[in-house]
Image (tube, rainbow, N blue to C red):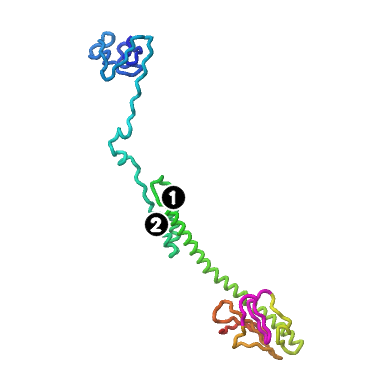
């Protein structure tokens, strides 16, 4: 039985490695390689690492040697290796973000580019989000999506307005014309009743005891009396259209300008009882 000259613990005779400190014992117990065990002459350890031999079994064990110092990246690789081979590539701008911004600006001139700007901008935002910082240009993508959305909405509103406004105006004109035709029809009926009772037609609305009901857009004329509209106007009787009331004939006139053009919208009714629409110059 021998002692390890490094840690001072018991080792088997002829052991080449200490089972406790894992040091090489071959150069100590068998330095020449010819003999081993108890017959091997004792040789001093290498001068670079002098073992601490425990001569007194009652003495405390010496502290174990410190662990080997790990190599760092700078000591394991040559200078500049980390910067040239291990560093991540520099971040760059996402191309689709710039494309989205350009198309978004052009979207105010053309309808299609606004929609394309929205699509490319959303694709760019998705790529930038999943790039872990390798792609830039999020602000460009957001600006492109915003410009494309605004231009797209403006053009969409324009298309809807171009379809809806004519329909609205047509409906409004029809409603106003129905008002004129309906009121003139009432005037005829009142005149027919007045003529049966008095043998002539009335010269005024007061004599007929008639006045328009509800909101009106036409002015109504009967000889010496008139009713101006609630909205629009005031209107005058056109120079080439007259109104009269005789024993066997009469004419009542309704006048308005619904579309603000040079021509007045004129309706007339006479003793025949059929309202008629005519266009005259102002």
| Camera-side residue of 121 and 56 | 56
Q: Secondary structure at mark 1?
A: helix
The magenta stretch is 214-235
| Camera-side residue of 210 and 59 | 59
Give the residue at x 36% y 9%.
57
- Which of the 4 image quarters holds residue 141? bottom left
> Mark 2 Cα within 10 Å, few/some/many (few <14, many 20+)?
some
Observer able to see residue 7: yes
Res. 6 mark: none
Q: To which residue does mark 1 refer?
A: 126
Q: Residue furthest bottom?
A: 247
List x then y, in percent, for residue 253. Answer: 64, 84
Image-based side of 14 in relation to 234, left or right: left
- Cα–Cα span, label 1 and label 2: 15 Å
Q: Is residue 130 magenta?
A: no
List x then y, in percent, for residue 37. Answer: 28, 10
Mark 1 or mark 2: which comes first in sequence?
2
Question: Which image quadrant: the N terminus?
Answer: top left
- Which of the 4 image quarters holds residue 184? bottom right
Q: With respect to residue 77, does 44 lie above or below?
A: above
> Mark 1 Cα within 10 Å, few/some/many (few <14, many 20+)?
few
Q: Main secondary structure of the magenta part?
A: loop
Q: Is residue 226 magenta?
A: yes
Q: With respect to residue 35, does 169 lie above or below?
A: below
Q: Secondary structure at mark 2?
A: helix
Observer able to see residue 271: no
Question: Which image quadrant: the C terminus?
Answer: bottom right
List x then y, in percent, for residue 219. Answer: 64, 80
Give the residue at x 66% y 86%.
251
Q: To which residue does mark 2 refer?
A: 99
């Amino acid at each position: 039985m021998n002692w390890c000259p490094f840690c001072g613990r018991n080792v088997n005779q002829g052991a080449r490695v200490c089972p406790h400190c894992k040091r090489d014992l071959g150069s100590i117990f068998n330095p020449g390689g010819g003999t081993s065990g108890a017959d091997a002459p004792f040789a001093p350890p290498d001068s670079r690492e002098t073992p601490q031999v425990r001569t007194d079994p009652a003495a405390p064990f010496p502290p174990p040697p410190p662990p080997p110092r790990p190599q760092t990246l700078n000591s394991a690789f040559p200078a500049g290796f980390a910067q040239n081979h291990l560093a991540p590539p520099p971040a760059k701008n996402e191309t689709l973000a710039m494309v989205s911004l350009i198309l978004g600006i052009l979207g105010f001139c053309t309808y299609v580019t606004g929609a394309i700007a929205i699509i490319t901008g959303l694709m760019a935002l998705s790529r930038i989000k999943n790039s872990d910082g390798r792609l830039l240009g999020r602000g460009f993508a957001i600006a492109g999506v915003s410009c494309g959305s605004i231009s797209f909405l403006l053009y969409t509103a324009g298309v809807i307005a171009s379809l809806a406004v004519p329909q609205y105006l047509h409906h409004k004109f029809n409603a106003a014309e129905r008002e004129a035709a309906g009121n003139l029809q009432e005037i005829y009926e009142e005149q027919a009743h007045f003529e049966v009772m008095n043998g002539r037609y009335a010269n005024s609305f007061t004599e007929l005891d008639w006045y328009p009901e509800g909101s009106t857009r036409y002015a109504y004329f009967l000889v010496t009396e008139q009713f101006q509209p609630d909205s629009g106007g005031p209107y005058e009787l056109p120079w080439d259209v007259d109104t009269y009331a005789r024993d066997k004939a009469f004419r009542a006139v309704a006048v308005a300008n619904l579309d603000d053009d040079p021509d007045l919208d004129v309706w007339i009714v006479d003793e025949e009882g059929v309202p008629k629409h005519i266009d005259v110059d102002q």
